[in-house]
Amino acid sequence: MDKVKEKAPASGGAEVSASEIIFNESITPIDGNVKREKKNFRELIVDNFAGGGGASTGIELATGRPVDIAINHDPNAILMHKTNHPCTKHYCESVWDINPAEICEGRPVGLMWLSPDCKHFSRAKGGKPVSKNIRGLAWIALRWAATVRPRVIILENVPEFVTWGRLGKDGKPDKKHMGETFRSFVYQLRQKGYKVDWRELKACDYGAPTIRKRFFLIARCDDKSIVFPKPTHGEGKELLPYRTAAECIDWSITCKSIFEREKPLAENTLRRIARGLEKFTIKADKPFIIPVGYGERCGQEPRTHDVHKPMTTVVSTVKQGVVMPSIQKYFGGIVGSDISEPLPTECTSGGHFAEIRTNIVKYGHGANLFYWEQVRELLNKFCEYHIEDDEILLLEINGENYFIADIGMRMLEPRELYNAQGFPADYIIDHDYTGKAYPRTKQIARCGNAVPPPFAEALVRANLSEMCGRKLKSMKDLWEVI
């Protein structure tokens, strides 16, 4: 016969909260006698819809312990999660096929994190019909609340989650019933004894180099207050400065000239590049500048130098130049983003962001003008400039005249995108735990779906401080603690 009950710690022992400890008391007959065994269990942490591991990583960096259970129906997501979180018990199943009481085995649940599929709420879905089943995934929270009663539930989604309502006959959200299902969801959680509150948060406010905005709902049944963490980064005097896209970029990677492509870029792409060139190089008050030393021709891989270090030796030929980079949302239709600001929100599609480098070279009479003629054509065509064939546009930097010699473009690499989401630099993204290589497209898909770890870390520290320890910055730090 097994029975589970909660007891306070014995007098004189270490101070432990009753919510942190449970005794599993088993009674086993042995030769007519009764033997009692007591086992000490800590509260479980469960990550439902565990994708690439963003939420789990943030939780673990806060608590210094592995997430106990991770659930996802996608084998690829489980592969990446298991690679970085090998101490977690993984279930590659639909959340509806899981019996919470069975997998928790009588142990209390301190935290359940939920990140149900958000694409059928997102504006990015546009006017296309949506899936009723996928929109209803959040209801799994009620099953867990009714069976194992997690002490704290945190649900993450897009801001449009609050519009959750019934669908019309056309398979699209019925505007007359907007938010109806969301209100019912909250009501039922409260009926089960949970306090419930929600808020929109921005990842850049908590140390991630992205402006990604997300909706968070917190429900708890332990009589403690729900806490939304105060921003740690921003423009205030007591805040750390925002982390930037520039921190995420690997400047050693070649940025090939847009004028040397076998297949020319589409006109809309050229238009965005030209307007970004005007905004972030020509008209920028404080352009982001990186000194480089060029080889025999413009466009070859640059030997990059730190802008805060002395310039390399100046030789008789003109080799010193600079690049002024910006970030282009490749399929987004926007002009671009300042490299000294957080990266815009990432999506799951591959090749979403491109780095644009404006290569400028010191001007001197008789100097090789490289691709200036093509640059001039872009400015005249897309930015309404009227630069004549015998004219050159000069930019003055520290009293020296430079001209635009070339424009480079490359898609950001998966590692750079994970950096922007706030993942530790040593998070494994290119292979699974068996050593099998992970395709680039799948790396990017996992990243676009991932919860920025700083979100999860901040929310867990604010609401479950009794579980948390010192600040950890890398997976190596985490494993040393574990």
Image (cartoon, rainbow, N blue to C red):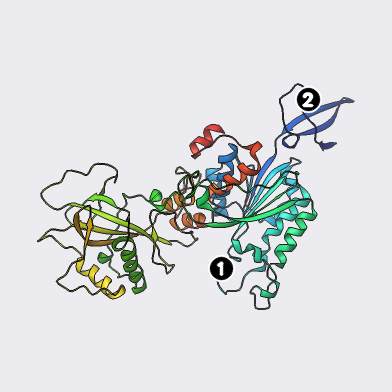
Under circle 2, the secondary element is loop
Q: Is residue 480 above or below residue 139?
A: above
Q: Quadrant where the C terminus lies?
A: top right
Q: Earlier in the sequence, mark 1 or mark 2?
A: 2
The dot on residue 10 is: 2
Residue to which mark 1 is pinned = 123
Q: In this view, does 323 lie above or below 67?
A: below
| Position of residue 19 measured from the top left corner of the image (x, y, whole percent) | 74, 37
Which residue is at the front of the view, 432 or 359? 359
| Position of residue 227 measured from the top left corner of the image (x, y, whole percent) | 65, 47
Residue 341 left/right relative to 85: left
Which residue is at the front of the view, 243 or 90? 243
Amino acid on which disc 1 is placed: Arg
| Position of residue 2 measured from the top left corner of the image (x, y, whole percent) | 83, 37
x 40%, y 65%: residue: 330
- In the picture as drawn, the residue positioned furthest to the top comes out as 12
Does the image show residue 437? no
Under circle 1, the secondary element is helix
Does the image show residue 379? yes
Q: In this view, does 76 lie above or below 124?
A: above
Q: Quadrant where the N terminus lies?
A: top right
- In the picture as drawn, the residue positioned furthest to the right comes out as 32
Determine the CA span between mark 1 and mark 2. 55 Å
Amino acid on which disc 2 is placed: Ala
Residue 375 left/right relative to 455: left
